[in-house]
Amino acid sequence: MKVNDRFILDIKRVGINGEGIGFYNKLAVFVKNAIPGEGIEVEVTKVLPKMAIAKIVNFKKTSPYRENPPCPYYEKCGACQTMHIDYTEMLKYKKELLIESIRRYTKLNPKQFEIRDTLGMDMPYHYRNKSTALVRKYNNKLTVAMIEEDSNRTIPVDNCLILDDKINEINKKILDIANKLNIKAFPDANYSLRYLITRVSKATRESLVCLIVYKLDPEIKNLLIEISKANICDSLYVNINTDSKTHLIFGEQTIYFAGKKSIVEKIGNFEYEIYPTTFFQLNSLQTANLYERVKKAAKLGINDVVLDAYCGVGTIGLYLSKTAKMVYGIEYNKDSVKYAYENADKNKVKNVSFYQGSVTKLLPELIKKGYNFDVCIVDPPRTGLGEEVANYLINNPIKKLVYVSCNHSTLAKDLNILTKKYKVRYIEPIDMFPMTSGIETITLLCLKDTKK
């Protein structure tokens, strides 16, 4: 097989990035926007030792689940990957992706425990409560931009269908002001405006805006003043990031400018303060479903002590606090620990305590000090627990683990270690990111010698 070869390919399954996968002479061929069950004439664009990448030339057979994407930017924008697939059917494919990861990365038989159907959304558009938008100038006009898939190029996006509508409206109003003031952005010389961070609470409809700039020059100060005068948002900040080579969005200096210091989001009966840099789930509506299912999995008693590892700003721990004796949280980010205590005070929760540091360092220290945990909640980053934490949980077992994961591949790798001591009771996938290939999961694990 070589580049530019053409042949007919039957698509067998969906890949982790939403692409269709078929096999040609036993070599896996990945095809963007292809769906299982389709027969496609493809053209090879890249050949690698264990796989090839191809593009669609003609359809010989189309799937009954193929949809016309409503987004005009879908073919180029890298934000969404599955808008061309019927939503209900895609929920089934996401479950299959989870099963495939278990088969690939573990010795487990996924038929020996319950894997539930993917919990979807009634309205799978306009769910994101935050945008991190590049600001670019096209045809002498500022616009928000998205990075084109598999490239460093950007494309202007006037309206994003997975963002809360209010975010789209706020971004347009701010850029209208910026255009009137002739604010510079790439590719202008000596520009300062880099990103536009916009957050909206689904519960209160409050909004927060943070401009990411190279420098706080008179031009940017004037823009901030005009945004404030126009009452476009409830909270206004600016962050200075002078590093032109970093992939990090935020620099070290975040400056409050006008309005409220924070906005409030509600999940269930709990309120959470949101600041520019606060880590918070991007889909508030599904987060309520996620936390309620974590609560059901934990099945806490009034005397149970909970460890909330990777606790962030305390969202899960606080949600569980009403049914637990005590909740202890571990979080590496110093600001997040500060906000976790603020959230506890705001919700009048007394039976929580948060510690700043790494899980690998603090968990052994807490256990050495005599802390006994009945339930452990882990919600690690995409990299997963890793061998060190997973092995520690085997050697110092807690009778019940509830593992919240945003990466089914690293979840499976961790399960391959954890199941030496724990038994998987069930895994429930939740569609936190409709129109993308992402999957959130809740896994309930119990020690092998326990029945509950």
Image (cartoon, rainbow, N blue to C red):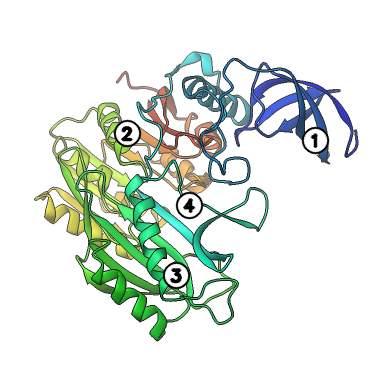
Question: Dot 3 corresponds to which residue?
Answer: 179
The secondary element bearing badge 4 is classed as: loop
**Measured Cα–Cα span from mark 2 to mark 1:** 37 Å
Taking depth in this image into account, of 368 and 198 the one nearest to the observer is 198
- Which is nearer the N-term, disc 2 or disc 4? 4
Residue 216 showing in the rendered view: no
Q: Looking at the picture, how far across and down is residue 441, in whole percent?
A: 42, 32
**Measured Cα–Cα span from mark 4 to mark 3:** 14 Å
Which residue is rendered at x = 21% and y = 38% of the image?
320
Question: Dot 1 corresponds to which residue?
Answer: 50
Amino acid marked by disc 2: Leu
Taking depth in this image into account, of 274 and 305 the one nearest to the observer is 274
Question: Dot 4 corresponds to which residue?
Answer: 158
- Which is nearer the N-term, disc 1 or disc 4? 1
**Measured Cα–Cα span from mark 1 to mark 4:** 39 Å
Count neighbours of disc 2 (C-alpha within 10 A) and say few if under 14, some if 14 to 19, many if 20 or more. Answer: many
Which residue is rendered at x = 39% and y = 85% of the image?
218
Taking depth in this image into account, of 451 and 351 the one nearest to the observer is 351
Amino acid marked by disc 1: Lys
Q: Quadrant of residue 316?
A: top left
Q: Looking at the picture, how far across and down is residue 189, in whole percent?
A: 59, 80
- Which is nearer the N-term, disc 2 or disc 1? 1
The secondary element bearing badge 1 is classed as: loop
Numbered label tally: 4
Question: Dot 2 corresponds to which residue?
Answer: 290
Q: Looking at the picture, how far across and down is residue 117, in whole percent?
A: 43, 19
- Which is nearer the N-term, disc 4 or disc 3? 4
Pointers 2 and 1 in contact (C-beta within 8 Å): no
Amino acid marked by disc 3: Asn
Q: Nearer the viewer, mark 2 or mark 3?
A: 3
Taking depth in this image into account, of 255 and 167 the one nearest to the observer is 167
